[in-house]
Image: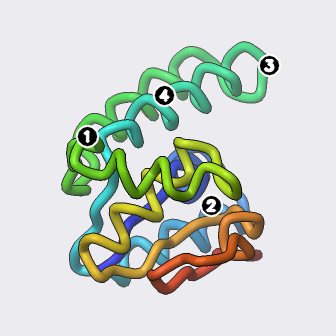
């Protein structure tokens, strides 16, 4: 079981190259994916950014948003995790800490493309950094 973070899911949905393929394979190999509900907002923000930068066109952006909407990840409310998210404040953003706290609560591995998260001290979950 994994908790997938926005960096991996956005790459899977938006990158047609090697990094995207790697992310899609990693996600396909996991029978159950989880994420905090904010996952959708972070990925939608990444889609918007790519659209505004001209990296993707409107059709690709709309397709990615629809793929995100139906993506089979179990979304979890982050409110029960707020105390642990706050505990991690010195080393992680609240956004990153939400993924870590959820992985800890579920005894799951966090799948991320962000090496910085894996280096934070005091984490109580396994971290798998997806690298091309």
Q: Are marks 3 and 1 in contact (CB under 8 Å)?
A: no
- Whether residue 16 is visible, yes or no, is no
The residue that mark 4 highlights is: 44
| Callout 1: SS | helix
User: In front: mark 1 or mark 4?
Assistant: 1
Q: How many marks?
A: 4
Whole-number angstrom distance, CA of label 3 to CA of label 4: 14 Å
Quick one: label 4 or label 2, which is nearer the N terminus? Answer: 2
Image location (x, y in percent) of residue 80: 22, 48
Q: Residue under circle 1?
A: 79
Within 10 Å of disc 3 (Cα), the crowding (few <14, some 14-19, many 20+) is few
Residue located beneath label 3 in the image: 53
Q: Can residue 127 be seen in this view?
A: yes
Q: In the image, which disc is placed on residue 49?
A: none
1 and 4 marks in contact (CB < 8 Å): no
Q: In this view, does 96 lie to the left or right of 39?
A: right
Q: Which of marks 2 and 1 is in front?
A: 1
Q: In this view, does 16 lie to the left or right of 111?
A: right
Residue 53: quarter of image: top right
Q: In which quarter of the image is the N terminus?
A: bottom left
């Amino acid at each position: 079981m994994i908790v997938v973070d926005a960096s991996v899911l956005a790459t899977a949905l938006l990158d047609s190259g090697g990094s995207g393929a790697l992310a899609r394979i990693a996600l396909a190999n996991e029978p159950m994916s989880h994420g905090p509900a904010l996952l959708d907002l972070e990925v939608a923000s990444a889609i918007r950014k790519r659209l505004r930068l001209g990296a993707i066109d409107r059709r690709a952006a709309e397709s990615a948003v629809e793929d995100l909407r139906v993506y089979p990840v179990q979304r979890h409310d982050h409110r029960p995790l707020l105390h642990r998210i706050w505990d991690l404040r010195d080393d992680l953003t609240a956004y990153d800490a939400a993924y870590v706290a959820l992985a800890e609560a579920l005894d799951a591995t966090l799948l991320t493309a962000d090496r910085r998260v894996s280096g934070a001290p005091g984490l109580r979950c396994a971290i798998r950094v997806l690298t091309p």
